[in-house]
Image (cartoon, helix red, strand yellow):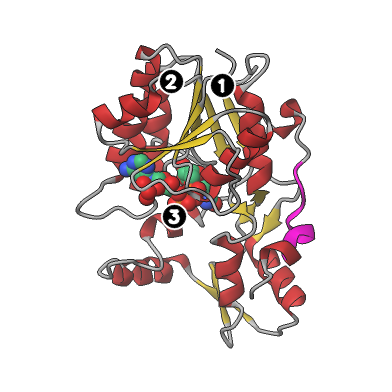
Amino acid sequence: MPNDPITVFGGSGFLGSAIVHELLGAGHAVRIAARQPTLPAWVKESDPLSLVSADIRDEASVADALDGAGGVVNAVSLYVQGRKTRFDEIHVEGAGRLARLATAAGIKRLVHISGIGSDSRSRSPYVRARARGEAEVIAEFPKAVIVRPSVLFGPRDAFLSNLAELTRLPVIPLFGRGDTLLQPVHVVDVARAVVRLLGGNPPHWRIYELGGPDVIRYRDILTLLLTYLERRRPLLPVPFPLWHLVALAASVLPNPPLTRDQVILMQQDNCVSEAVGTFAELDVVPRAMRDCLPECLTTT
Ligand SMILES: NC(=O)c1ccc[n+]([C@@H]2O[C@H](COP(=O)([O-])OP(=O)(O)OC[C@H]3O[C@@H](n4cnc5c(N)ncnc54)[C@H](OP(=O)(O)O)[C@@H]3O)[C@@H](O)[C@H]2O)c1
């Protein structure tokens, strides 16, 4: 039914809440599913938005969250695994469960959020889990669309705000020589792409990789931020083996500021590849990060 709600798993997260906002703006009814779902601060009383408590690891709660939905988005994340929750539980088994139950519920559209660089042969358990999760989703829901964003930026993001904090140090350590290429993408542009994929004609591609208009070296992003923030700091190349030692030492902390998976991710470029769908097919013109610094760094 056209007015059946779209269930957004992880709809209270950074990307998920942007997707919820854009879906409401496009006239959809929306259901936010998360372990502790919360209403966004911007919500209006008249918005057709509801909350449902669901854990992607729990069969019954996922089935409840999908009941009567017209479409579903999986924007659940786990960046750091611990003894209690492993990557596979969320990114492979959870993703597969959601896809299987969506098929059983007769849901027409499923958009699964993954990330550029997902690779079943990676040294990183996180990156391997993302690749295996994608395969699981396609096996359980063959018409699912996989969306792989590059690194996300936007107001109250983790990316630019953490880098801006780094520029307070007297010397800024680089990952290697800082040559890794990134293609930062605005969270709202990805959200708009997801809305496109949920409505209208069936999408042409099974996988969409979404990156911003600029491919930028990590060190050049820092230089851009330093210029914007009017700070002068030297950039210090730090070899990757040293970063792996730092991540190993940090792994004993309850909330490690850096993980081995993040170091491995920074060892390879994170840009849109070929033979995948892109923003161009979705009529979304992504905005450049340099133009968005004022809205993203207002409190820095
Ligand atoms: N941020 C980036 O730069 C970036 C880049 C590329 C790809 N991505 C991908 O985009 C997706 C969303 O990332 P994000 O950064 O927006 O994540 P986020 O801000 O950390 O939000 C995660 C969401 O998932 C929910 N969640 C976590 N565990 C859950 C569980 N067991 N069951 C149900 N819901 C659960 C959280 O709510 P509760 O805690 O209340 O459950 C929250 O709503 C992920 O797949 C991520 O890998 C992100």
In the rendered view of the protein, which quadrant contains the N terminus?
A: top right
**Spatial separation of the CA atoms under disc 1 and disc 3:** 26 Å
Q: Which residue appears at 48% of the width and 49% of the height?
A: 13
- Give the residue pinned by disc 3: 264
Callout 3: SS: helix
Callout 2: few (<14), some (14-19), or many (20+) C-alpha neighbours within 10 Å?
some
The yes-or-no answer for disc 1 within 8 Å of ligand 1 is no
- Give the residue pinned by disc 1: 206
- Give the residue pinned by disc 2: 138
Q: Which residue appears at 57% of the width and 76% of the height?
A: 165
Q: Amino acid at mark 2?
A: Ile
Viewer-proximal residue among 5 and 267: 5
Viewer-proximal residue among 207 and 294: 294
Q: Nearer the viewer, mark 3 or mark 2?
A: 2
Q: Looking at the rendering, which quadrant does residue 162 occupy? A: bottom right
Against 288, is 30 above or below? above
Residue 253: x %, y % from top left: 28, 70
Q: Are marks 2 and 1 in contact (CB under 8 Å)?
A: yes
Residue furthest out toward the front: 45
The segment highlighted magenta reads 286-293
